[in-house]
Image (cartoon, rainbow, N blue to C red):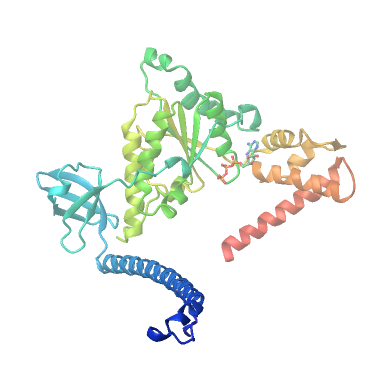
Amino acid sequence: MEKEYDSKPVFSGNVSFGDEAEEIPEEEPKLAQYLTQLQQQNDILGESLRQVQEESATLRDLYNNTNTELTSLKKPALLVADVSTVKGDRAVIRLTNGNKFYSYVTKDARHIKSGDSVLVDQKTLNILQKVELNDNYDVEKFIILDKPKENWQNIGGLSKEIQEVKEVIELPLKSPELFEKVGIKPPKGILLYGPPGTGKTLLAKAAANSTNATFIEIVGSELVQKFIGEGAKLVKEIFELAKQKAPTIIFIDEIDAVASVRMENGTSGEREVNRTFMQLLAELDGFKPLDTVKVIAATNRIDILDNAIIRPGRLDRLIEVGLPDEEGRAEIFKLHSKEMNLKGVQPKELAKLMENFSGAEIRAACTEAGYFAIRNGRSFVTQEDFEKAVDKVRIEEEDTEYKKTFG
Ligand code: ATP
């Protein structure tokens, strides 16, 4: 708010000199008062001036900042590219859309090497400078890094599969000397395939637990959808991290999202998935069978998987994890109901009822049965609760199947 200052002269009396000098003393106090008032006015004006000057300085700063911002906005953005190879003052660069260029390296960027990220002029595609994009790129944010608690005893009905996983993953990690003595190379990894909810993740976690290995979990579909342009880099860094934290089991769920046979349609999304896949193959080829890193991949869609991933020396041990048979269902049921307060429940009968159920559905049926008991105000669960729960889970399953098929 602007201040208003009184501009009326404060002194209104007549000041006279000369002959009437004797009257002056009478006027002196008035003059002194006038002077004080003038000084006060002067102070107020001085303060206003200081404020106006301060305001002006702030506005000048604002103007300068806006001007700089405006100039920056007018400048064209620089492209970010990866360096493939360097030859003197020229280098092959790759843009995130996959296009490659043979570019001139300017003076400031002479120290670049392959694998670096660089800033590139949009028009000339000359390399201007190196950038450290990975400074705050914390791979651990994008994956699940865990020391799982699940063990072999938590898995029901998969004794043959457990045996195989033990041989391929557990044994080489625990006793590599055995393989060296006999002179064979264990597979670097395995591919678990089968319907959803059958215990593939469980197997991988139990393997990590029994070998006291770090468990790194990544999901194929996330790798290609969430980290567009970064998928290949992320794969590289995951393997790097796995080596640092060894012994490590890298679990790649939904591997089909990265490693499926695709129509070559030449889109940038397609090229991106391809690059991520190529990086994955390169990483698999890059470590030795007796290294302390093992890869377990899982898929529900083995039918669309690219053969390159299961070639010898890669994930060349295929293990089918199918729906459990009756005996398996009974075992899984026992595992998931062991903490429940049961009354008159016949596991064998229920196992028959749960035909075609996966382990995950059996677990869901146990939870549902518990809810039926709670709704009826009981603290124990009966055979009838389970029967109703099995029906409920089956209907829900059919519903989702129907929706998947007909939308
Ligand atoms: P997806 O293909 O959907 O990833 P998956 O095969 O990896 O499924 P899991 O995640 O291992 O399935 O199983 C989900 C849950 O179902 C497990 O956490 C476990 O509680 C239960 N389960 C599945 N199979 C078994 C099994 N064989 N024994 C005990 N529990 C099981």
- Most foreground residue, 311 or 138: 138
* 249 relative to 345 in the view: left or right: left
Question: Residue 16, image x and y in percent?
Answer: 42, 85
* 300 relative to 331 in the view: left or right: left
Residue shown at the point (76%, 48%) measured from the top left:
368
Res 194 seen here:
yes
**Relative to residue 164, is residue 85 depicted above or below?**
below
Question: Residue 214, image x and y in percent?
Answer: 49, 30
* 378 relative to 88 in the view: left or right: right
- Most foreground residue, 265 or 84: 84
Q: Quadrant of ligand 1?
A: top right
Which quarter of the figure is the C terminus placed in? bottom right
Residue farthest right in this picture: 377
User: Image quadrant of residue 354?
Assistant: top right
Residue shown at the point (17%, 58%) measured from the top left:
125
User: Image quadrant of residue 370?
Assistant: top right
- Most foreground residue, 292 or 383: 292
Residue shown at the point (33%, 43%) measured from the top left:
279
* 207 relative to 389 in the view: left or right: left
Residue shown at the point (29%, 69%) measured from the top left:
67
Residue farthest top in this picture: 181
- Most foreground residue, 326 or 334: 334
Residue farthest left in this picture: 88
